[in-house]
Amino acid sequence: MINLSPTLKGLVTGVLMIVMSVYIYSTYGNFENNAQYITYALYIGGLIWTLVSYHQQEVLKTFKTYFSQGFKYFIVVTMLMVLFTIVFMNMNPSIKEEMAQNYRNELFREGNKTPAEIENLVLQMKEYYSTMITSMAIFFYLLVGTILTVIFSILLIILNKKRARH
């Protein structure tokens, strides 16, 4: 059996997530649908693949070593998804315009701002849109990767201790 490094597993998973994201966008015209959960499942599946593969090796297994494996995986996926987000947003400026129009409509519906204030807020949103979306991608993938790596690492350590007792 080929033993891939966590970095390579992150690369494979990240590419699959990008392909799935492009497919979802080209099929549905947006990312606001349940199909997007497939990319999250790929992310989680890749993390589990990485940690379980490490768990099956005959090596020292501590929380630190498990977390290190998971970190190497999710940092590569995060980097790929952030690069994809930047490239995708730059290649599809209509998304920013659509968001600006939706934001404008929402502000008009609220009815507590003047037209000049609304236009100023929409301009600010457009100016910071790419930074905001990129920051959210970074935060999401790092946070989810960290939390899930901690949880799965603890579970695998417990499993390893139970197996060692029997």
Image (cartoon, helix red, strand yellow):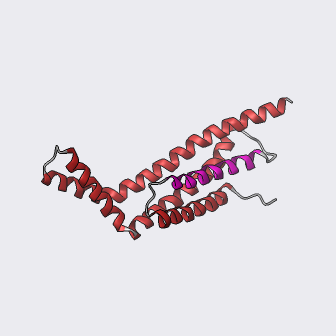
- Report the front residue among 154 and 93: 93
Give coordinates of residue 30: x percent, y percent: 43, 60
Quadrant where the C terminus is found in the figure: top right
Furthest-top residue in view?
Answer: 165
- Report the front residue among 113 and 157: 113
Relative to 32, 145 lies left or right: right
Question: Residue 163 lies in what quarter of the image?
Answer: top right
Residue 104 to residue 65: above or below: below
- Residue at x 60%, y 62% (from the top left corner): 16
- Residue at x 47%, y 54% (from the top left corner): 33
Give coordinates of residue 13: x percent, y percent: 62, 59
- Report the front residue among 37 and 138: 37
- Residue at x 54%, y 63% (from the top left corner): 18
Q: Main secondary structure of the magenta part?
A: helix
Give coordinates of residue 113: x percent, y percent: 16, 46
Residue 44 lies in magenta, yes or no? yes
Quadrant where the N terminus is found in the figure: bottom right
- Residue at x 52%, y 55% (from the top left corner): 36
